[in-house]
Amino acid sequence: MDYALMQRVFPFFLEAAWITILLSVLTAILGLTCAMLGTAARLSRFRVLRFLGAAYVSVFRGTPALIQLFILYFGGPQIGIQLDAFEAGVIGLGINVGAYMTETMRGAIISVDKGQGEAARTLGMSKWQAMRNVILPQAMRLMIRPLGVNLNTLIKSTALVAAISVVELTYTAQRYIGSTYKPFEMFLIAGLLYMIIIYVVGLGVTWADRKARLN
Amino acid sequence: MSAQKPFIDIRHAKKSFGTLEVLKDINLQVDRGQIVAIIGPSGSGKSTLLRAINDLDPLTGGEIWLEDKQINMDLPHRQYERHINEVRQEIGMVFQHFNLFPHLKVRENVTLAPKMLKGLSDAEANALAEEQLTKVGMIERIDYYPSQLSGGQKQRVAIARALAMKPKVMLFDEATSALDPELVEEVNLVMKQLAEEHMTMIIVTHEMGFAESVCDRVLFMDQGVVVEEGPPEVIFRNPKSERTQNFLRKHLAGQQA
């Protein structure tokens, strides 16, 4: 292994890791937003909204994220959607992970005991008051861990946007391989940095989960 | 008394799930301050009837009135929601599995709805919670979480939570069925106390002894109909219907076994 080379390129990888982190944060925010809308739709009393929610989930979970990115980035201009690679990456992955998170949130909400909603409603609370004050606080605790799993998957799938030339970790590794012909070293650095990011996020999820359980 | 309009008036209540008829034309009138027990085998429709009163299980036919207000009115969705939320504030309900809010302390379980729905200030709501929890003997546990309480204690808090809305009627859906035998009495005592205060109550129960000592009237339901109804001493000591006799015999045998 060429340690000297690894040391020399490491700062550039570190920079690229920040792009990966930024990409992950923005995607997670968009994903959570999509998931809230998706969950609301799936639990709506209107059939049309329930259908749209279910369709969103099955389309975006039923096709490869890479194809979704390609359609958005390469196919988008054909129908008048012009995005730069970074924007396309955030939007494409965000909508994709939102579909997974929708199922996580919905699952947590419907697994709160039915009696909880009934007790709230018999006291006179509206459907929304019961949701907001009784069901959601309990569902939140249930969804922290599975959302953490979604987040873990999301961070790793940011590697896909290398395919539309966003200069993040994976793309950076490929670029240095082009000039150094050392794929082993380059992918090793990239992999290590992904692992660190995921480890730190995992710690955060565990902490949040424990905190939620304590109160 | 008898010339007065009934406090709760259930007329021709019908309920089916698909082709299964759970309630077949039930009529029940309850006067203010009356305590009615509903007994019967499981699947008889007694819980469904109780849950229909506050529209947890909406009827598919018939009418339910509370004083001069029809509960199951035919209204557009939004208006109906507003209507039913108001009606439910006047009807307290106690469940077999307590359904306390596990993320809230005992105090907050009791204050949540009054604060939210009646606009009580923190101080007012606290005073109310203390009053109701004292009444059910749970004031010492006001800062506990439900998970730290026994079943009987949970149920007493659930009763306090319902009472805090100052309901006109209390519905009990097998309130002691999920309790260990030694915890039943403390809940029964609270219910007796409510009876002495002339709270109007409808009690679905398997506890014949309790029903006999507290209730003014007993309904025996089987397969979606009221088979027999009358004063407890008649229903329990001298039932006319063979189905009632069989049920009571089996029930008694089950208790002794």
Image: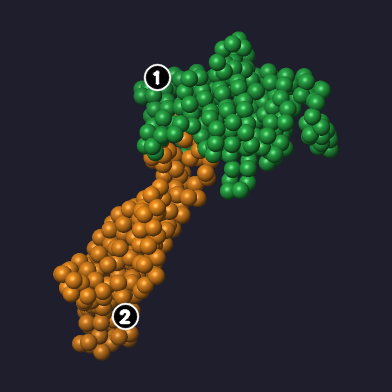
Q: Colour of chain A?
A: orange
Residue at (50% x, 19% y) in the render: B67
Residue at (29% x, 63% y) in the render: A94
Query: To which residue does mark 2 refer?
Result: A187
Q: Secondary structure at mark 2?
A: helix
| Chain letter of disc 1 in the image | B
Q: Nearer the viewer, residue A23 or A107?
A: A107
| Chain letter of disc 2 in the image | A
Q: Secondary structure at mark 1?
A: helix
Tell me if B226 is positioned left or right of B53 in this view.
right
Q: Percent from the top left, x then y, of residue B86?
A: 42, 27
* Direction bottom: furthest residue: A181
Residue at (62% x, 17% y) in the render: B34
Q: Colour of chain B?
A: green
Quadrant of the image occupied by residue A181: bottom left
Which amino acid type corresponds to the residue marked 1 in the rendered image?
Answer: Glu
* Residue B123 is at least partly visible in this image: yes
Q: How is the image coloured?
A: by chain
Q: Nearer the viewer, residue A182 or A33?
A: A33
Q: Percent from the top left, x then y, of residue B24?
A: 64, 37
Query: To which residue does mark 1 refer?
Result: B124
Q: Quadrant of the C terminus of chain B?
A: top right
